[in-house]
Amino acid sequence: MKRLPAVAGAFYEADPQELKDRIVWSFTHPVGPGKLPTVPKEKGKRDNLFFIVPHAGYIYSGPVAAHSYYYLASEGKPDLVIILGPNHTGYGSYVSLWNKGCWETPLGDVKIDEEMAMELVKYSEVIDIDEQAHLYEHSVEVQIPFLQFFFDSDIKIIPIVILYQTPEIAEYIAEGIYRLMQKHPEKDIVVLASSDMNHYDPYDITYKKDEMAIEKIEQLDYKGLYDVVENKDVTLCGYAPIMVAMILAKKFNKKPYILKHATSGDTSGDKSSVVGYLAARFGS
């Protein structure tokens, strides 16, 4: 069971060296953190368990994503990364998990943690085992080369995409992940919530709309975030993944820290129609 890359050569470079160069570029870009993190050889206790990361083409969102990966890598290699993304394609079930084998990128193959994946399916009650939803979906895939860049390919993942994005679904998924993390305190588990912010408004309007959503994230008000998306015309695509991260942050007593908010206009220069991007961490 190997999931082949769907957006290599489009969202990021298909050539391994060019892809690594692009990731370095993301960190050193003026919108990025400015430098690469140092990955510690000896791992301490992880403070930042949950992150928000964007998922556009690296030339647009890579420098923003780099802010979250800076903190993740600085605390060492996790045992497991659960990657939650929205389902843009409409294929598959309401909540779809790829449970076996590996995912391939130009930097190699990353294995699924099959045992933990099956436990999570059992605990969450709403997650289905479903490969179809993942075949052409980019929101999870674009995170993996960042992980491989710092930790090689000997890192394990659980990929999940969410089609039915409601607070209730987010609560079920968060409870499942919470139970998994409580059951395995010996495992260093990180959760990535993959989402872009408002889509295709002019720069100033996108910034204002994003700030409405960011305010709710800072308050850990996940139902408020849902309301902003549903009723304020804020076209944030991965609101269920973000809601899951917010619910988990409350359960683990973690605070939200906004690391970087920017738009495609900040990286491409075209501010007439932009997409917003957010990097955030949930820690002490």
Image: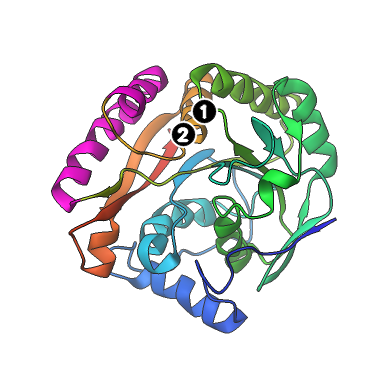
User: Which residue is the site of mark 2?
Assistant: 242
How far from the left and from the top, in percent, is residue 173? Answer: 62, 25
Q: Quadrant of the C terminus?
A: top left
Q: Nearer the viewer, residue 160 or 220?
A: 160
Looking at this rendering, what residue extends furthest in the front direction? Answer: 90
Is residue 86 rendered to the left or right of residue 107? left
116 is within the stretch colored magenta: no
Q: Quadrant of the N terminus?
A: bottom right
Is residue 21 rendered to the left or right of residue 183? left
Residue 219 location, quadrant = top left
User: Which residue is the site of mark 1?
Assistant: 165
How far from the left and from the top, in percent, is residue 239? Answer: 44, 33
How far from the left and from the top, in percent, is residue 32? Answer: 33, 63
Q: Amino acid at mark 1?
A: Gln
Q: Residue at left 59%, top 64%?
A: 145
Q: Amino acid at mark 2?
A: Ile
- Circles 2 and 1: CB distance less than 8 Å? no
Q: Residue at left 18%, top 39%?
A: 208
Q: Nearer the viewer, residue 167 or 65?
A: 167
Q: Nearer the viewer, residue 123 or 275?
A: 275
Is residue 135 rendered to the left or right of residue 267? right
Question: Dot 1: few (<14), some (14–19), or many (≥20) neighbours within 10 Å?
Answer: some
For numbered disc 2, what is the local secondary structure?
Answer: helix
Q: Nearer the viewer, residue 275 or 191?
A: 275
Question: Dot 2: few (<14), some (14–19), or many (≥20) neighbours within 10 Å?
Answer: many
215 is within the stretch colored magenta: yes
Q: Earlier in the sequence, mark 2 or mark 1?
A: 1
Q: Which residues are magenta?
A: 202-231
Q: Is residue 160 positioned above or below 216 on the image?
A: below
Which tag is nearer the camera, tag 2 or tag 1? 1
Residue 189 appearing in the image: no
* Predominant SS of the magenta segment: helix
